[in-house]
Amino acid sequence: MLFIVVALAGALLFVYRPAWFPAAANATAAGWDHQFTVTLLVTGVIFIGVHLALAAVLIFRRRNGRRAPNGSRWMEISWTAATAVLFLSLAAMGSRGWARIPERAPGEERIEVYAHQFAWAFRYPGPDGIFGRTANKFVNDSGGNPMGIDPDDPDGKDDIVSASLRAPAGRNVLLLLHSRDVIHDFFVRELRTKQDILPGMEIPFELHVDKPGVYEIACAELCGLGHSQMHSVLIAMPPAEYQQWLRAQEPRTH
Ligand SMILES: [Cu+2]
């Protein structure tokens, strides 16, 4: 009876979905959802089938007082082979999902992401299209310079620094991820993607959001006491509105 209850309760959880993912924000994320649904269906049907079969065997044995046969080599070989085929097929489907990750396009917009304990900062290169030099000694959070832009570098004069990430919807944007201290992780649930950020490395991340909207950015790597407070927002805007916003930004004053 316990096996039957476990099997049916497990199935009900997925049929009624008391909690589920937020809507996917791009085609890659929708691809992951599809893969997840297929995996869940296949493994779910097997899970319920195995539990019901086990329950049936137990009931049958009790009624008839018969012992189960000691084993069957043929059956063991066939379900081991079937499991191998199943998992390899799911893995092959999954690698098709990886192949759908947006590709880098020449001339696409670049935005730098700076993670630090326990906040996010974003930098746009400004009208000249060039990011100014940075160095740790120039880092000044209260002075609005969380990435440490060199005040003597003319390329940095027009850089725009923001506490939230604005990006044009429907376009590919190359994010360049940096960490100032420990390992953090850039995570947007609607993109179904997490990317670790390692100090001392610049990690590229192709961002593509189909629909304008506001999405939470969370740190998905336990990075210290304030980890749970480390979030920001990704604001995907219609491209024209985004350009307008960029033009309206004051360049840094120091
Ligand atoms: Cu973090």
Image: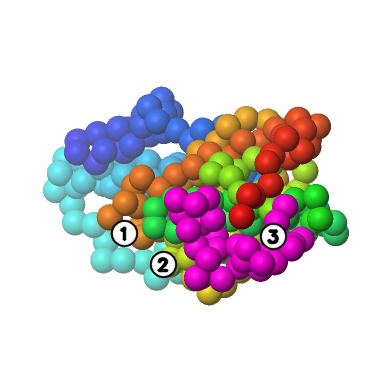
Label 3, on which residue? Answer: 156
Callout 1: CB less than 8 Å from ligand 1: yes
Residue under label 2, please give it.
Answer: 182
Q: Earlier in the sequence, mark 1 or mark 3?
A: 3
Q: Secondary structure at mark 1?
A: loop
Residue 110 seen in the figure: yes
Quarter of the image with the C terminus in it: bottom right
Q: Earlier in the sequence, mark 2 or mark 3?
A: 3
Q: Is residue 36 left or right of residue 51?
A: right
Estimate the spatial distance between the alpha carbons at disc 2 and disc 3, rounded to whole Å. 25 Å
Asked if one can make out residue 37 in the rendered structure from this viewpoint, the answer is no
Q: Residue at x 70, y 56 (%)?
A: 157
On residue 210, which mark appears? none
Query: Which residues lie in the magenta part?
Result: 130-158
Name the colour scheme: rainbow
At horizontal 45% and vertical 33% (from top left) the residue drawn is 20
Residue furthest to the bottom in view is 200
Q: Amino acid at mark 1?
A: Gly
Mark 2 against mark 3, which lies toward the viewer? 3
Q: How many marks?
A: 3
Residue 101: x %, y % from top left: 69, 54
Q: Is residue 30 above or below residue 198?
A: above
State yes or no: discs 2 and 3 in contact (Cβ < 8 Å).
no
User: What amino acid is at disc 3?
Assistant: Gly
* Quarter of the render that holds ligand 1: bottom left
Binning the other alpha carbons within 10 Å of mark 2 as few (below 14), some (14 to 19) or many (20 upward) gives some
User: Which callout, 1 or 3, points to the residue nearer the camera?
Assistant: 3
Q: Residue at x 31, y 59 (%)?
A: 224
Asked whether 149 falls inside the magenta stretch, the response is yes
Residue behind mark 1? 224
Q: Amino acid at mark 2?
A: Val
Foreground residue, 28 or 64?
Answer: 28
